[in-house]
Amino acid sequence: MFGITARQWRDANPNTVGNIRDLASLEQLVVLSNLESINAVLIHQGLPQSDRLVQLNKIAITQMNSLVGNKSLKKLE
């Protein structure tokens, strides 16, 4: 979702209080929440981790493209 692991982010931002989610945009948080739910469904379906990763990445890209620039979502901020 963020292009790096939480550990990589912490190592690159040692003086920042909080974690990568604390600095995420509203769009990123919405997509992250959706991905967590979808991942649970894929796990329940027995999909291997490598297949889940591919699918979740495609879904994240699609959702981010849909949300970025969405005027209705901007009103929520």
Image (spheres, rainbow, N blue to C red):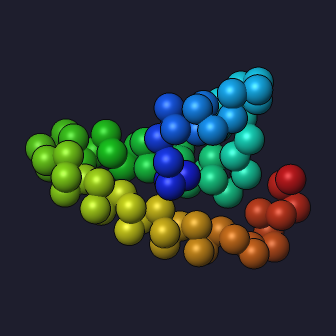
Task: Tell me residue 30's x, y (percent).
Answer: 61, 51
Residue 42 visible? The answer is yes
Name the residue: 74% across, 41% down.
23
- Determine the residue positioned at 60% across, 74% down: 66
| 10, 52: nearer the viewer | 10
Q: Is residue 18 above or below residue 3?
A: above
The residue at 39%/61% (across/down) is 57
User: Residue sitting at 49 percent across and 72 percent down?
Assistant: 62
4 on left or right of 70: left
Q: Whole-percent x and y of residue 67?
A: 65, 68
Residue 41, percent from left and from top: 28, 45
Q: Quadrant of residue 64?
A: bottom right
Residue 40 lies, in percent from the top left, at 31, 40
User: In screen coordinates, is 31 left or right of 60?
Assistant: right
Circle count? 0
Q: Is residue 34 visible?
A: no
Residue 46 located left or right of residue 39: left
User: Observer-nearest residue: 70 or 15?
Assistant: 15
Using the image, determine if residue 17 lies above or below residue 6. Answer: above
